[in-house]
Image (cartoon, helix red, strand yellow):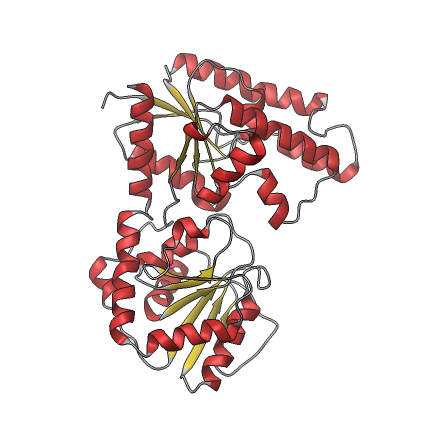
Amino acid sequence: MPNHRVGFFSSRNYLDRNAFSGTLNSMYRALKATELQVVDLGNPQTPYRWRKIWNRARKDKSSGKIGSPDYLVEYTKFAYEVQKQIIQRNCDLLFAPVASEELSFFQTNLPIIYYSDTTLKLYQKYYPLDLDEQEIEWKDRQEKIAVSKATKLVYSSEWAAQSAIEDYQADATKIEIIPLGANLDDPPLAEQALSRKLASPCQLLFVGKDWQRKGGTIVFETLTALLEQGVEAELVVVGTVPPVKHEKLKVIPYLNKNVPQQRQKLNELFLQSHFFVFPTRAECSPIVICEANAFGLPVLTTDVGGIPTIVKSGENGYMLPLSASGAEYAGLIADIVSEPNRYEQLVHSCRREYDQRLNWDKWGERMSQIIGDMLD
């Protein structure tokens, strides 16, 4: 493949592993690991001010809202700088992850790949948006423009892609689906992940900040239902303090993945646990499922949002209906625990799905192939 020069088009700090949950930086590093020549665009380490202007204006009801002179002046600075960089650095193509706002005003003759894990229409349905009608209309218009400008649209799930087609009139022939990868700098060796064995007590793991939205109540009900069935079990909750207590419940309020010792602690929990229980109420493309699979950890989750692209029921976990109760999750766990060979096969297929689909190397390979096909 020729050394195609791909401009990384974003106003966010894609060099920061903490920004945007680390996903932009993972994309950036995955592309750089291929034969592509990745060109830094914008000024990632000094993010542009138009979002701050908008946020400040929304609080004090001043004139800095989207579309106002202050906002547009700041955006123009970004556009002008990037236009110069594209010419000076000889870009062949722009890769624009979650950059509908940036693309909506930007003019270029270069081919564009727009990448996202959702659409505004979907986001509105599942997440609270602190926006008034005018602001929602503006952002919706920005997304429509970005979708129409893109030469290729890449989404992390069929769920998001279908919304782009139905809600934003995206051309289905321009769409590709590539799931996200696990944000792990040092994933476990396959031998380590596959050494997992069932033991008593059965350890359930829950990771998430939002107890209600992530289905924490159902996880707790799963624990109590297992105990009532005579299955020795315990639950470890990471990332929040639940509003319940139990002698078989252990709580770790917070672990910072960017602190090596705390990342190691989380890795140990992934290795020691027997099931990752994630009955989330709403989700786009949860990377934590990919991370669990890297450790060979089976995932029990809901058939919602972009999850069906990640989880193949019976392969790297199981999806239950959104209406499923904790007793139903417990029943599934009890069935699997009663068949050690079934559990062992599930562990192996979890790791296989991670190796074959749910890592950033595979994401980079797929994206590199798409870019090569576009430019060749």
**What residue sits 30% from the left and 52% below the top?**
354
- Residue 264 percent location from the top left of the image: 36, 61
Q: Height in image: 345 above or below 26?
A: below
Quarter of the figure with the C terminus: top left
Q: Residue at x 33, y 26 (%)?
A: 371
Q: Nearer the viewer, residue 22 or 114?
A: 114
Q: Is residue 365 left or right of residue 40?
A: left
Report the residue that reaches farthest toward the right.
61
Of 56 and 354, the residue lying toward us: 354
Does residue 171 appear in the picture of this structure? yes
183, above or below 97, in the image: below
Residue 167 lies in quadrant: top right
Please state if 32 lies on the left or on the right of 145 as rendered.
left
The location of residue 256, given as percent across then percent down, is 46, 57
Position of residue 308 measured from the top left corner of the image (x, y, whole percent):
43, 52
Residue 140, by quadrant, is top right
Q: What residue is at 38 percent from the left and 68 percent from the top?
A: 275
Residue plotted at (51% across, 21% down): 149
Rendering coords of residue 190 (x, y %): 22, 58
Q: Does residue 121 sit above or below 325 in this rendering?
A: above
With 270 as the anchor, is 323 left or right in this view?
A: right
Q: Is residue 121 shown left or right of residue 255?
A: right
Furthest residue to the left?
A: 191
Which image quadrant is residue 122 in?
top right
Is residue 259 in sight in this rendering? no
Name the one closer to the observer, 249 or 140: 140
Task: Examine the rendered structure and indicate whether residue 61 appears above or below residue 183.
Answer: above
